[in-house]
Image (cartoon, helix red, strand yellow):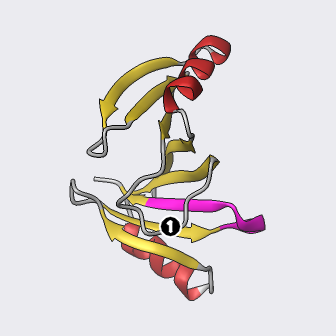
Amino acid sequence: MGFRINHLHLKSPDPKKTADFYVQYTGARVAKETKRPDGSAAYRLDLHGVELNVTQFLEEQELDQFMGLEHVAIDTNNFDGEVAKIKSAGVKILEERTLPDGRRVCFFEGPQGVRLEFLEWK
């Protein structure tokens, strides 16, 4: 069973301003800037080895969204087993879906309502 942090995701009304803040004040670097289908900018930052994604709200996401730290994403090479384990423990599942690249994701609720995500590690 292997785990690793995949990314942290920040939702912002102004992704560029937020990305610039992390670059200027934390030494992050912009690894990738993209335009989303809705025309908004999205940033992938390298925060000293930790991927930090900065976007506005995502139209394709059904789960409620909010500004700030939205979730912690964790890769697992045992996706089915780990999802089954949290389900059998009664952990609240928030959303399951498949990403455009074919990887499966499962959002679930951690202690104090912190949103967590398992990503299928391929």
Q: Is residue 37 above or below residue 118?
A: above
Q: Which residues are magenta?
A: 110-118
Say which amino acid is labelled 1.
Phe
Residue drawn at the location 37% of the way across and 37% of the way down:
40
Farthest left residue in view: 101
Give the class, few, some or many, for how many residues have Cα within 10 Å of label 1's Cα (few <14, many ≥20): many
Residue 32 location, x and y as percent? 35, 25
**Foreground: 63 or 115?**
63
Residue 122 location, x and y as percent? 27, 53
Residue 60 location, x and y as percent? 35, 61
Q: Quadrant of residue 109?
A: bottom right
**Foreground: 86 or 10?**
10
Residue drawn at the location 56% of the way across and 24% of the way down:
17
Q: Is residue 44 above or below residue 22?
A: below
Q: Secondary structure at mark 1?
A: strand
- Left or right of residue 101, residue 15 in this image: right
**Residue corresponding to mark 1:** 107
